[in-house]
Amino acid sequence: MPKFEEELELDLELHEPQMFKVLLHNDDYTSMDFVVEVLMGIFHKTHTQAEQIMLQIHEKDKAICGVYSFEIAQTKAQQVKQKAKENEFPLLATIEEDS
């Protein structure tokens, strides 16, 4: 049986993954201390950063907590939902495409 050597030229284009913002939304029931706790625990913010973001949420009704790949952003939003539910707060986390 004859041997065939075949060279394939493949041009692979690598693309950066689409990134997504995770936002926390203001409500009238979730305590500011709990929001700071979430920002430090789930988003790994320092206490100072967490307080600044919490104040943005309070003043502007929402703020970006981080920008991640889709899977990580989705996981972070789910972690917020779970922690809020466990603590009986209606804190809302959403994700949206980063432009």
Image: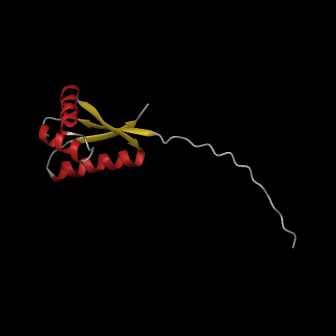
Q: Residue furthest top?
A: 59
Q: Does 44 sit left or right of 3 as displayed?
A: left
- The x and y percentages for residue 54 are 19, 34
- The x and y percentages for residue 29 are 12, 39
Q: Does 86 sit left or right of 42 as displayed?
A: left
How many numbered tags mark residues here?
Answer: 0
Among the 4 quarters of the image, the one containing residue 58? top left
Residue located 74% across and 49% down the image: 9
In this view of the protein, can residue 83 be seen by the observer?
Answer: yes
In this view of the protein, can residue 26 be seen by the observer?
Answer: no
The front one of 53 and 48 is 48
Residue located 15% across and 45% down the image: 89
Among the 4 quarters of the image, the one containing residue 45? top left
- The x and y percentages for residue 37 are 17, 44
Tell me the quadrant of the picture where the C terminus can be found: top left
Q: Residue furthest right?
A: 2
The front one of 3 and 70 is 3
Q: Residue furthest bottom?
A: 1
Tell me the quadrant of the picture where the N terminus can be found: bottom right
Coloring scheme of the render? secondary structure
- The x and y percentages for residue 79 are 27, 50
